[in-house]
Structure formats: C-alpha cells, structure tokens
Image (cartoon, rainbow, N blue to C red):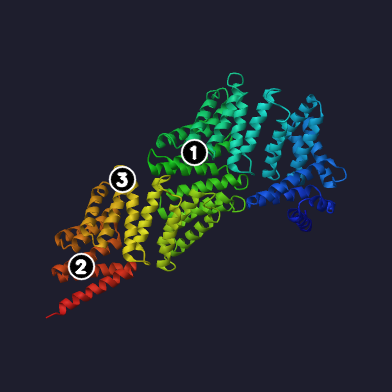
Amino acid sequence: MDEQRRQAYLNLIQQLLTCPSGEDDQILESNRELLDAELLQVMEQEAEKLAADGDQNAADFLGSLRSQLLEIISESSTLVNASSQDYLEFLEKVLQATADSNGDPKVVYPLLEANLDKLDDNFIDILKTWASAKLSELEPETAEGIAIVIGNFSILFSDFPLGNRATQMEIAIAGYETILTVFTNESNPKIWASTQNNLGIAYIYRIRGDKADNFERAIAAYQQALSVYTREAFPYDWARIQNNLGSAYRDRIRGDKADNLEVAIAAYQQALSVYTREAFPIDWATTQNNLGNAYSNRIGGDKADNFERAIAAYQQALSVYTREAFPYDWARIQNNLGSAYRDRIRGDKADNLELAIEAYQLALSVYTKLDFPEKWANTHYNLGNAYSDRINGDKADNLELAIEAYQLALSVYTKLDFPEKWANTQNNLGIAYSDRINGDKADNLELAIEAYQLALSVYTKLDFPEKWANTHYNLGIAYSDRINGDKADNLELAIEAYQLALSVYTKQDLPEIWAIAQNNLGDTYSKRILGNSAENLEKAIASYQNASEFYIREAFPEYWADVQRNIGKLLVQQGSWYDGLSRLEQSLPIYSHTENLEALADSVYHIARTHHLIMNLDKARMNYRDALRIYNHLNNQPGIAICKTGLGMLMISIGFIDDARQELTQAYEICHTIKDKQGIDNIQQLLQVINKIKTKP
C-alpha cells in the first residue's frame, strides 16, 4: 500500500478510537471506500502497538471491531474489493493445486512464488474465514477431504523457502488449527495426532508472539500427539515426537532450566530406544546430535561428565553424517562439537581449544557466506570465542584473529535482522578489544566501551537481565582500565556499571559471578579518587568481604587468597598494620602452590612494605629481596621498580645512603623507560632526601 493510503487508514482508526460510543457504525459507513483487507492489516498492527504500550482496552476494542469487519469483508460481495477477491481466488487455486498434485512442492511452490505479494496477514484472515464458513456447511466426509488438503498445504508452507518467514509460519499454524476443528481424537486419532505434531513444530519455529508461550504451546501439542502415538502401537512416530519434545524442553524458557534439560535428555533417550543406527541411521544420528546439545547445556550432573557425553554423542552423529553424504549436517555437528571442546573440562585445555578451532574451521569449509550466511556467521562467532580463549600460539595474534572473526560475524548479524546475536557479538568483540595487545591501548579501550554500549542498545534489564548484567560488568572493567577521559570520572562510571550488574547478580541466584563483581567493585573503590578516602576504603573492604562469603578457602583457594591479599593491603592503608599483615601472610601458602607468580610477588612486596611501616626492617629487607627475585624472573619492570624503590627507602632508614642511591637510581631508570610519572616523582623526592643527608656537615 502507498503511504497516502496507509495514512487514510490510520486517520480512520484514530476516529474510531476517539468517537463517542455508538458512532463507529456511522464512521465506517461514511468511509466505505477504505473497508478492505489492507485496512484489517493496519488495524492488527495498531492493536499490537496499543497492547505493547499498555492500552489494552483500546487494543481489545480495535481487535473486536476488526473481527466484525473481517466477517463483513469476507461475506459481502458489495464490500469485497478486487484485492480481497484476488486473495480468495488465489487461496482456492493453491488448495486445488495441492489436491491435484498430492502436495507436490514442484507444482505448488511455483504458484506461491508467483504470488508472494499475497502471502501476508490478509491471506491468513481470508483462509480462516473461508475455511470456517466452508467447512461448517459441508458434509463431514467432504469437509475432512478439504481439511486434509489444508494440512498438506500447511506442511508445504512450513518449508517454503521464499517470502516472509514469520508470515508463512502464521499461515501454517492457521492451517493446522483449522484441521483440528474437523478432526478430533475420537473421529480420526491418527490425523489428529499427526496434526498436533506438525502444530508443535510450527510453534517451535514461530517468530511472532511471545517466545515462551510458543514453546508451551509446542509442548502441549506434542503431548497431545503422544496420547495417540504410543510406543506399542506406533513406535517410529512415538520416537519422532519424543525427539521433538526433547528439543522443545531443551530450549524451553518457562520452568526450571535444569529440570527442563533433564526432561529433554530423557525424551531423547526414549527416542533412541527405538531409533537404532542399523534400523534408522538418519533419525539416530539426528537424535544423537540433539542429545549432544542437551548435554552441552546440562546444569544437573557432573559438568565434566556432561561435556564428555556431549562429545561422544556428536561423534556418534558424525559416524553417519559424513561430509560426502551430508555436508550441511556434517558442518552443523562440527560446529556443535567445536563448542563442546571449547567448554570441555577434562583433558588439556590448550589441546581442547585447538580441537575446537579445528572443528569450527571444518564447518566453515562447508558453510559459506553466500550459501549459508547465518550458519557462517554463527561459526565465525564461535571461532572468535575460541581464539579469544586460545592458549597456544601468540596471544596478540589470537586476539587479532578473534576480532576478525567477530567482525565477519557482524557482516551478517545486523541489529535489524539479528538483534540478540548482534548484541552477543558486540559484547564479545568488546572483551577482545579490552584484552587486545596490538594497537594503542587507549584506542582499544574506547572501541571496547563502544561495543559494550552497542550491545546495551539491545540488552535491556527486562528482556535480557543476565546479558544486560554481564555487559555492565564488562563495561565496569573497561571504565576501570580506561586511559582517555578523566580518571576520576572513569572510576565513577566503573562503580556505576558494577552496581548495575549487581542488581541482577545476586548472592542467592548467581553467587559466583556476584562474588567476582563484588571483588572488582572492591578494586575500584580502592582506587577511587572522588568521595571521602576513608569511606572509599570501607566500601572497598566491605565489597571484598562480600566476595569472601562465596570464595571460601576449601572450595576456591586461589580466589580466597586474592581476597585476603586485597583486604590485607587496604587494612594496611587504613593503619591496621598487624591485621593487614596477617591477611597478606595467609595468602602466601596458597600462592606458593600455584603458578600465579604475579600474585605471589604482590603479596610478598606488600608484606615487605608492612614490615617496613612497623619498623621490622630485617623482615622488610628480606621480603623486598624475595619479591624482587620473583619480579626479575617474570621480567615485570613495574614490579622491579617498586621493589627497588622500597629497598632504597629502607636503606635510607638504616643509613646505607650509597646503597639507597644505587637502588633508587636503577628504579628511576625503569620508571623513565616505562613512563611511570608517579614513580619518577616519588624517586626524585627520595633522591632529594639523600642529597640533603649527604650535604649535612
């Protein structure tokens, strides 16, 4: 419809919504030239908008009026304009072609392709009204014959590759629901059950409506089908629907996620009790792949076992789905196998990531952007995740490969067409930029922040609470590390982002990520510039102590040690030297048995600094030297500089001025090389102290 015509419809709808009660008939009579199928389409769209805006009364009024007009337009020859008549003639022609060809796509699809302009919501309305009127006036046997044709026609629509996918699924659903007004469980249980199964599939793939509702309707339809298709009477059909039911429970939104996955696994295993590789190799392989997906996502049971079972199931599927015979399915399962290896717990982590990358690359040897754009994009997204986590190879190169993979995914995943997948990719691209080694660090952090903010244009707290929280958490890290802008402002933005994340990440529901966010919030408060310094330290300590409620020593020894170290440093800063020293020393036995030498060196350095403050100078010197040895081993230049600065200060305290000058001069050279302005300023002040001491008579 042209814009002028659409505006005329909108004006009429506005008149109907605002007119006094009882005057709507008069308004319709004076606008008879606008009463057509296109008006009904616009009325439906406006009713949906009103409902979304919370004006349910107006939406209900418009919906009721639309239903009345639909009956009039469909039945009255005086009101059926050429457009509506065309729809009716097209419907009858399609049904006839379906009947004559016994549902042959080669006959029906060319007819649909030639009439893509009629495959819209008007067609759905015409189908419903025509079928309701036609089937009610026919003899039962004739009505059943037409219903069977509508069923075949609906199956064809479900698989039709052209046109608007959302509308086509609505047409298929309308067709299946029409059949169920003719066939009942009592009159023809087999057709009724088959239609329930088809209706379940259509709701799974439905684009419109509430996604959670669609899954509930699909599950209900499958369960209805299983009341007829029992294992004893129809073993193959029973297994087929068990497989479908498993997929519905696997992706179900309502109910407990863990419970849903257990039901899904049980359903797949039921299907596999009939589907054997020998008797039904394709169905067996398909169900093995589905079972692999369920085990990959499983919450119950041992996590490591679940991934092993997922990998085994995918490998079973690949024994049937070979590249030569089934290239598309082979690629799909390679992609799934890659994700299972990426998340695998057993085996060597580095090796698992190499296997994941190999599997994704195999999938991409079939998935091309031209032939399978969405699958190609999804596999590049997964490949980006694997390169981000990769252990082998050069870290900088891996991050470049990850960024490239995400950007390729975004060439297909646009915000308009794939909003959630676009946002997922933007979030992960932000992480890659935040970690990036190549390029300018300040620029990389700006790119990370931009990507996170783009993701948040889709992720809302209402619709995607966990993803919204995760992106705010990531944004908090980026603002905390940010180089551009005012440092104080950046830290405020980081605190705000962490607090927003913690409005979703609660101790009760998501204890582990809650603890991580609390720890990061503590880090940020400890560096905060604005506000009262003492209050900031209190808030930092409180956040770390919150984290320690989850990170107990027995379950998470290294995280527990991190929290003890952080609290210890702040207690020392507050002046609680002995309490702080105790916390720092508690972390040492843990770090001594890990590979985290950076954390060990940091603890030892702060123990040295604390002993220095309380004038245990021998212990201070010994710990400075120990920390320096670790930093030298790591070639950590900032760490070497602070240890030498500490030793220089210590030497001044005990009167070894020449040794002090030597340590401080070496520290100064390092600070100059790494452009540590604050370190340079501190050392210059200490050198001035030495010069004053030297000049005293």
Q: Residue at x 27, y 64 (%)?
A: 641
- Using the numbered discs, state the Cα–Cα distance from disc 3 to disc 2 in whole angstroms: 38 Å
Relative vertical location of residue 216 with respect to residue 190 in this rendering, above or below: below
Q: Position of residue 200 (x, y in %)?
A: 63, 34
Residue denoted by label 1: 257
Q: Position of residue 230 (x, y in %)?
A: 59, 22
Give the class, few, some or many, for how many residues have Cα within 10 Å of label 1's Cα (few <14, many ≥20): some
Residue denoted by label 3: 552
Name the N-terminal-most of marks 3 and 2: 3
User: To which quarter of the image does residue 677 belong?
Assistant: bottom left
Relative vertical location of residue 185 with respect to residue 462 in this rendering, above or below: above
User: Where does the C terminus fall, quadrant-wise?
Assistant: bottom left
Using residue 39 as the reference point, say whether residue 629 is left or right of it. left
Name the N-terminal-most of marks 1 and 2: 1
Q: Residue at x 72, y 30 (%)?
A: 181
Q: Element at badge 1?
A: helix
Q: What amino acid type is highlighted by mark number 2?
A: Gly
Give the class, few, some or many, for how many residues have Cα within 10 Å of label 2's Cα (few <14, many ≥20): many
Using residue 688 as the reference point, say whether residue 258 is left or right of it. right
Name the N-terminal-most of marks 3 and 1: 1
Q: Which mark is residue 648?
A: 2
Q: Element at badge 2?
A: helix
> Considering depth in this image, is 682 or 25 the residue closer to the camera?
25
Q: Position of residue 165 (x, y in %)?
A: 67, 43
Q: Residue at x 15, y 61 (%)?
A: 616
Give the class, few, some or many, for how many residues have Cα within 10 Å of label 3's Cα (few <14, many ≥20): some
Q: What amino acid type is highlighted by mark number 3?
A: Ile
**Does residue 201 appear in the picture of this structure?**
yes
